[in-house]
Image: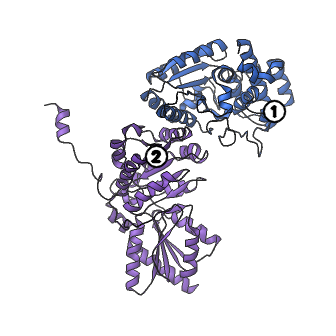
Amino acid sequence: MSIEALQGLARSIRRRSLDAIYHAGSGHPGGSLSAADILACLYGREFDLDAIAENRDSRARFVLSKGHACPALYATAASVGLAAADAANGLRKLGSPFQGHPHVLDLPWVETSTGSLGQGFSAAIGMAIGLRHQGNPARVYTLLGDGELQEGEVWEGAMCAAHYRLGNLCAIVDYNKLQSDDLNENIIGLVPLAARWRAFNWAVAEIDGHDIPAILAALDAARAETARPSVIIAHTVKGKGVSYMEANPPWHGSVKLSDRNMADAFADLGPQDTETEEWRHVGRA
Amino acid sequence: MSAALEMKEAAPALIGTSGDSLREAFGRALAELGAERSDFVVCDADIAGGTGTHHFRKAWPDRFYQFGIAEQNMMAAAGGMAATGLIPFVTTFAVFALRALEQARLQIAYPRRNVKIVASHPGLDVGPDGASAQALEDLAAYRALPGMTVISPADPVEMRLATRAVLAHDGPVYMRSGRSNARVLFDDNHEFRIGRGRELRPGTDVTLIACGVEVARALDAAGILAAEGIAARVVNMATIKPLDRAIVERAARDTGAIVTAEDHNVIGGLGGAVAEALAEGTPCPVEFVGVSDRFGESGEPEELAEAYGLTGPHIAAAARRAIARKRKG
């Protein structure tokens, strides 16, 4: 998929995320929008979508450790054809498989249930150990929030993954600098974040998480790193793509979006790309 | 000579790593199963000598995963390992299984992962390590997780059979082993089935329903009562969840009075499970033997059992109370 096509996919993920949150009447737009470009690169290029759709043993495993950003994951699945196009509009509704946090028994293409921060990361480590134990070369990817790194379990896992030299594991930190109540640095500071991961013996890349070529290059480097787990610290903007949300704290928790909010957001994001309904086919080309 | 070498020569013996404890029986059973099946692995948090899994580590080092003193990561990672098709045994002390309860909830119970959590050092049976190490809440906490099977075997023979059974069972399990040497109650003809209680002694006046170390003490109580002319039925309820409701109902109908006995808080464990079943079925007087909603303290297991009311004479006294309530009825 071309850079332009991945940018179009990211736009589709953003539009669908907001659409789902609008219909749900609540949800986390900020952390969904900040992760859209990363998810576009993972599902638009890094992963074999057929292997995921058919649940093959060879498929890459992806764990959304920051489970509250699931509107973006559901939007991605809809955009690449893993889920029906408008299915995520059942987000947070009774009886819908698109729960407020992802659940593996509801959605066949989700690898595990998340929503309690830190746990998805550990589960991804367990998957990496399990795959290697069975001689399966499949890789494991997990996306963490920055506030999530305040969970002690993350650093238990960081030690463990480095100890076992899990070269088949790639963690990505959606480093948008904001968490539920305030800036990370005003809650419990994460700086110097890259140095902390390096000190835990991880291979560290630090990139602009909205720069598609940079994300792709970091994923390439992580794949080439076989003796250590890799972490990509992706500097992002919470609410990215919607001017009134960007770096504006009220939009970062669970919110209700009005018709006016949606009109303004969609105006910022640009028109629906006609290609977006065909991502799955574009992705395979 | 270096200090390190001197230390090695004078290495102290670890207390309680051999003998007829349930943890030893568990560790030996695991090692034995390792020869039969290669689809399971053992996860440890730096206490293999304490949980009995050192036997497995020695026999099958490539299937033994050390997670260090990091139970939360170990528990959630075990869920991830199970997602790839392995069957992990997560082994730790019962108090640390409580520490990782939420990981067991979200990464094991909720996704229905085939993980076996086997926790040693439950209850006052821990002894001298004192209250901080004595898990009196684990059966209640794990029983409250949807889909979680909860087991507490009574002796080393049953522990061995239960280890085999939980591996054969498809689904998440929480199982207690035990620290101290346990009385051997069963012979090689003993059978263990998940979800099935077993009558160990017939009786018509009262039924004593026990699990874990309390089964031996319930048998003591039945002996004491027999000398007074009271026929106490004894049921070994090794599976707390799913509870064998049929055997509980039968006990209520046949004997009209029940005593539950467990090395656990009286809230939410075996007693709670039996009372719930009776309330929905055939209510009858129930007396609860266990730790009365308080923390333990240091002491030898038998001293603690006496001080906290868990021994045979205490169970017998509870039986007399239950029978008196039945008569007042």
User: x and y percent of residue A134 in the render?
Assistant: 49, 34
Q: Does residue A268 appear to the left or right of B41 in the view shown?
A: right
Residue sitting at the far left: B1
Pick whichever, A104 or B260, lies toward us: A104
Q: Quadrant of residue A85?
A: top right
Give the color of chain A as drawn.
blue
> Which dot marks residue B89?
2
Q: Name the image quarter holding the N terminus of chain B.
A: top left
- Say above or below: B119 vs A201: below
Q: CA distance from mark 1 to mark 2?
A: 41 Å
Q: Position of residue B28 (x, y in %)?
A: 35, 52
To which chain does the residue with label 1 belong?
A
Q: Is residue A211 visible?
A: no
Depicted B61 relative to depicted B22: above or below = above
x and y percentages locating residue B86 in the rendered image: 51, 41
User: Which chain is displayed in purple in the rendered image?
Assistant: B
- Pointer 1 local density, CA inside 10 Å: few below 14, some 14–19, many at least 20: some
Q: Is residue B269 above or below residue A128?
A: below
Name of the residue lying farthest toward the front = B36
- In the rendered structure, the answer to whether residue A130 lies left or right of residue A45 reads left
As rendered, which of A130 and A154 lies closer to the eye?
A: A130
Q: What percent of the width, then of the height, locates residue A259?
A: 86, 30
* Mark 2 residue crowding within 10 angstroms, few (<14) / some (14–19) / many (20+): many
The residue that label 1 is drawn on is A86
Q: Amino acid at mark 1?
A: Asp
Q: Tell me what residue is drawn at x 45 percent, y 32 percent.
A: A160
Q: What is the quadrant of residue A61 in the picture?
A: top right
